[in-house]
Amino acid sequence: MSLHYESMMHTTFIDEMRFLYMGFRLFMTTTSLDFLFMIGLRWFLIGTLLFSTQCVEALERRGQENLITWRVTDWAPFYILHGKMKGKGLYDQLLDTFEEALPEYTHRRVNMTTQRVLFEMKLEHNVCHPSVLADTDAHLSKVNSILLPHKLFVNKRVAQAYPGHQIQLINLLSDQRFLGGLSRGRYTATLNQLTSDYGDQLNILDVPFYESLIKMLFNHRLEYIIEYPAVMSYHASMHDMAADYSVRNITEIADTPFLKVHVACPKNAWGKTIIDRVNKVLLKESEDKKLIQKRLFWYAKGSREELREIYLREYFLDK
């Protein structure tokens, strides 16, 4: 119950006590029939007030059920909240599709952290997350996109010392010859665990801002970082930086060559209803011949070709 209604009930109680006192005095000076009539009128008015309050609460609940709060975050090119490409991120455009297909709902986008949106969903608030992995504790949609996993982006010195297409991450982190950058806690679960003990080494720079790491790699102040391929290609294109780095797969996550992404909503009846509606939108969208082209827009050529094969093989399995 809102504070507004608690205040109203408190005021009503005080008024009722005042009325009973006045009624007692009136009873001493008038007939009992008039007094009983006034008592009945008073309770009729109180009943009408309570009924009206319940109606207002019901309308408010109905309004909340028709509102979807979508989580967004400043994480280009998945979500682009600023600049000339604002609103053109992968999940920005997916939200455009959902909002157009579900006009009976009121949609709002709120910038929030992963921790906050997971907390909001745990409280069963009407909040949904457009880009979660399959291990998220929520009602999950069909697959809405597929991403290439984190990879190592290394300079020429590291590439020469570690030839081949794959590097064992813990070996590189322990290698004092090379200065690497980490943003611990913002990777997938496996990588977060692997990097948790390497933040205090002299050859590791641990900062919370992933964009800073990318710029330092571009400016030759770092020799390797861990990042998503789409994020790297976006920043290279936006800052007009040549791809003066090599890409290596990470040995410890070699068994996860791609990541399937879902929409998540709270684990309640409202959340299930929204996910059912989202699934219908995704099924219809899967008939679009340009769907894969749209999903791959932010990838560089090599990654785009790799991911296209994965989409053709995996994306339509649940459609």
Image (cartoon, rainbow, N blue to C red):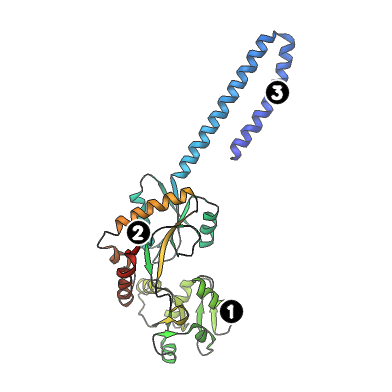
SS at circle 2: helix
**Which residue sits furthest left?**
289
SS at circle 1: loop
Front residue of 239 and 17: 17
Residue 221 in the image, given as x and y percentages of width and height: 47, 82
Mark 3 residue crowding within 10 angstroms, few (<14) / some (14–19) / many (20+): few
Q: Quadrant of residue 8?
A: top right
Front residue of 85 and 170: 170
Whole-number angstrom distance, CA of label 3 to CA of label 2: 60 Å
Whole-number angstrom distance, CA of label 3 to CA of label 1: 69 Å
Residue 144 in the image, given as x and y percentages of width and height: 37, 61
Q: Amino acid at mark 3?
A: Arg
Tally of numbered discs: 3
Find disc 3 in the rendering and name its residue: 18
Mark 1 residue crowding within 10 angstroms, few (<14) / some (14–19) / many (20+): few
Q: Is residue 204 visible?
A: yes
Find disc 2 in the rendering and name its residue: 93
Q: Amino acid at mark 1?
A: Asp
Q: Amino acid at mark 2?
A: Gln
Find disc 1 in the rendering and name its residue: 197
Residue sitting at x 63%, y 13%: 37
Residue sitting at x 37%, y 55%: 279
Whole-number angstrom distance, CA of label 2 to CA of label 1: 37 Å
Image quadrant containing the N terminus: top right
Residue sitting at x 44%, y 51%: 272
Please tell me whether residue 122 is drawn above or below residue 229 in the rendered image: above
SS at circle 3: helix
Q: Earlier in the sequence, mark 3 or mark 1?
A: 3
Mark 2 residue crowding within 10 angstroms, few (<14) / some (14–19) / many (20+): some
